[in-house]
Amino acid sequence: MLTMAQIANMSVGFLGIQFAFGLQNANMSRIFQTLGAEIDDIPILWIAAPLTGLLIQPVIGHLSDKTWSPKFGRRRPYFLVGALLASLALLLFPNVQALWLAVILLWLLDASINISMEPFRAFVGDMLPDNQRTSGFAMQSFFIGIGAVISSVLPYLLTQMGVANEAPKGIIPDSVKISFMIGAAVYMITILYTVLTSKEYSPDQLKSFGVIEDDHVVNIKTRPDKFMRNGLLWLAIGAVLSLGLYLYNQQAAEPLKQELYVLTIGLGVYGLFQLLAFLFARSGSKNGFIEVMDDLNFLPDTMKKLAIVQFFTWFALFSMWIYSTPALAQHMKGTTDASSQAYNDMGNWVGVLFAFYNGFSALFAFLLPVLAKKFGRPGTHMIALILGGIGLISFYLFKNENMLIVSMACIGMAWTSILAMPYSMLTQALPAQKMGVYMGIFNFFIVIPQILAATLLGFLTKSVFGGEAIYTIVVGGCSMIVAALLTLRIKDK
């Protein structure tokens, strides 16, 4: 059992990680447009974020599972390496003057953030007994909320202090530059704090606890012929879907979004990876690559059930993140003109509302352990997701924009649970020696709904709802309630 002070020390670094994510999310489109990107090109430029996480997190998870340094531990070396690279990217980013360089730096920044972030989830599983893990992930939610609020409003606060918010064409404003410099410092300081104030259990200690057995034994459970069959199957599925998408887009009046190719081609690439694992398995090799491919073929049952919950949950969140401004401007202000005063006023208010839900999330984080003790982890997550779904649906019901703060209180409760409860339930079901790699694989079920949402929500908005984006938000609310009901399938041991 660790004290609350020790749990807080473990989690401070997440403030820096979220600070960097907040700056990235709030300013990246602005930077791309400043450097000459067309508005229609921005989504494909943004694909770096989910794609990088998809590739980096399982790799870093596997490597951190296999790492042990007597001085720095298992996960903390990755915190530090990610912080150094991310801080460098944050310092370089605001000074770029070419779009291609900004895209490369976005990949570097997102990869670096993922190097730090993925081991943090496994860190809680390593260091806390099961009855403290909800508190551990809730503490992470608290620091995520604080980091998100401060980073989101930082350029605005600097502007109010007299820092220039405008610049010549092709130059990034000083308010953004200074925000990124502050972000680099916050990232490095908070990660260093966690690294220096926390320590990790050695492999020998974990063995003495009975948590792990021999961590050097590699047991590949997938037979070579199973690798081959899986590879051929996924390669065929990816090829058929990619070809079907291409043919559809050639004929359709409104082609589906380019981001969908990432998913269809990705399925084929996964098939190729399984075939490569077949070649290694046939030769008797037992390297890290084949081990990760084997882990993908044997996901724990609880993880499979949580994956479906995550899919509907994050589909709902992306409906809010993508469509809140256009939906509320149209529904409450009666305008779709992005250059109008009413539209931009609503855009500013949506930024404030997002700060509200992150602030509420930070406050509600302290309720999670109490609720989990009373209702169990699946029950607590179900309650939070139902509140989140009601919050999204209330976008349609409320006619006064100030009432949306109530909506954000509900969404804030859902958000703090989304950041904590699935991981708390998941760590209970994972073997300790594979905590990192499975946490990385779990990220797939955040990325895949993000890619699908970019296409399906646009289709729903245009073709089904006649451009009325408020109904898309309602669909998101319903999706979150479906996710809530699906938590009933999960048993809390």
Image (cartoon, grey):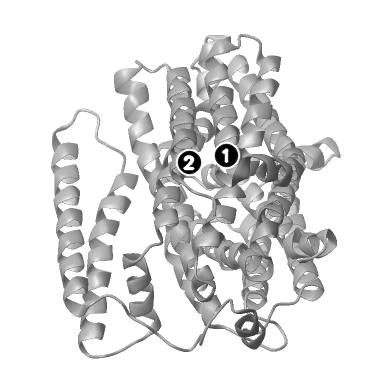
Q: CA distance from mark 2 to mark 1?
A: 8 Å
Q: Can you say which quadrant of the picture contains the N terminus?
A: bottom right
Q: Is residue 365 left or right of residue 491?
A: right
Secondary structure under tag 2 reads helix
The residue at the point 69 percent across, 28 percent down is 409
Q: Is residue 70 left or right of residue 214?
A: right
Closer to us: 159 or 325: 325
The residue at the point 31 percent across, 39 percent down is 257
Say which quarter of the image contains residue 253. Answer: top left
Secondary structure under tag 1 reads helix
The residue at the point 23 percent across, 69 percent down is 272
Closer to us: 115 or 6: 6
Closer to us: 381 or 54: 381
The residue at the point 18 percent across, 31 percent down is 252
Say which quarter of the image contains residue 402. Answer: top right
Which residue has dot 1 on it? 379
Q: Position of residue 216 (x, y in %)?
A: 48, 89
Do the CB atoms of the residues marked 2 and 1 lie less than 8 Å apart?
A: yes
Q: Position of residue 174 (x, y in %)?
A: 73, 48
Q: Is residue 44 left or right of residue 87?
A: left
Which residue has dot 2 on it? 487
Q: Is residue 469 left or right of residue 117?
A: left
Whether residue 341 is situated above or below residue 251 in the rendered picture: above
First in residue order: circle 2 vs circle 1: 1
